[in-house]
Image (tube, rainbow, N blue to C red):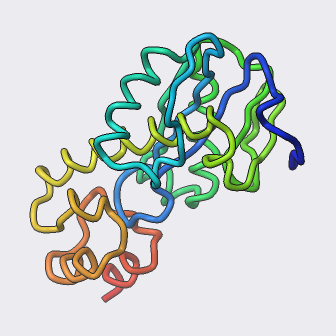
């Protein structure tokens, strides 16, 4: 369901859920779920894309320290290729909510659709800039995935993964054409699929 309401009025155990990594050509899609503690406010929460890397890193630690509960989950490249990116994202969001050590009364999901959950849920378009718990989830997911990309950049040099984080930039596409896909590339995605068919 869509909620047309003032999210500042929503109290109690609300989990915010968000994902990072639907668009990249490689790596997992990473999700997070966060239940904030009203007694321990966190200043400066916003859509992770609107924050500097240094600010995200600082908030990452503060969220993990102050939240009532948080969980980071993922769907792997094989799952993305088998299920498609939308279903893999929904699965990863489901895993994030199920991973919370406190059961939320409501899960607010960034975007326009909800995964199948055992708790009531609502989709919130542009939720990461409206709902603090979704903003917190976006920060945990983004920092986690960015850190993974730095590790993958070491394992698969030459693709520039640390810079573009797997997104289909000119640098990434050129490296793919020159070096070919790696085991972490999503074979169901157009540019990778096209290379495999050559």
Quadrant of the rendered image containing residue 9 = top right
**Quarter where residue 173 is shown:** bottom left
36 in relation to 135, above or below: above
Which residue is pictured at 28% across the width and 42% down the height? 54
Q: Residue at x 57, y 20 (%)?
A: 41
Q: In this orientation, which residue lies closer to the viewer: 151 or 191?
A: 151
Q: Is residue 69 left or right of residue 148?
A: right
- The residue at the point 40 percent across, 31 percent down is 59
Q: Position of residue 1 (x, y in %)?
A: 88, 46
**Residue occupying the far bottom of the picture:** 198
Pick out the residue farthest to the front. Answer: 43
Q: Is residue 22 left or right of residue 86?
A: left
Residue at (53%, 22%) from the top-left corner?
A: 70
State the image coordinates of residue 184 (x, y, percent, origin top left).
30, 56
Picture layout, residue 186 above or below residue 3:
below
Q: 149 left or right of 190? A: left
Where residue 164 appears, x then y in whole percent? 28, 65
Q: Quadrant of residue 65?
A: top left
The C terminus sits in image quarter: bottom left
Give the mark count: 0
Q: Nearer the viewer, residue 88 or 145?
A: 145
x then y, percent, for residue 69: 56, 16
Examine the rendered structure and indicate whether residue 172 appears above or below residue 115.
Answer: below
């Amino acid at each position: 369901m869509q909620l047309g309401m003032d999210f500042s009025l929503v109290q109690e155990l609300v989990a915010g859920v968000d994902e990072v990594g639907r668009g990249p050509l490689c790596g997992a899609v990473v999700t997070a779920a966060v239940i904030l503690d009203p007694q321990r406010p966190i200043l400066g929460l916003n859509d992770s894309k609107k924050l500097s890397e240094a600010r995200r890193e600082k908030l990452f630690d503060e969220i993990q320290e102050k939240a009532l509960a948080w969980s980071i989950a993922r769907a792997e490249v094989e799952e993305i290729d088998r299920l498609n990116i939308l279903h893999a994202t929904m699965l990863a969001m489901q895993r994030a909510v199920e991973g919370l050590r406190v059961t939320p009364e409501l899960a607010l999901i960034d975007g326009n659709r909800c995964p199948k959950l055992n708790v009531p849920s609502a989709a919130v378009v542009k939720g990461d800039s409206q709902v603090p718990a979704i903003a917190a989830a976006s920060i945990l997911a983004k920092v986690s995935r960015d850190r993974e990309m730095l590790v993958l950049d070491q394992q698969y040099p030459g693709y520039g993964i640390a810079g573009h984080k797997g997104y289909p930039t000119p640098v990434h596409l050129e490296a793919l054409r020159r070096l070919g896909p790696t085991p972490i590339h999503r074979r169901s995605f157009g540019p990778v699929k096209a290379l495999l068919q050559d």
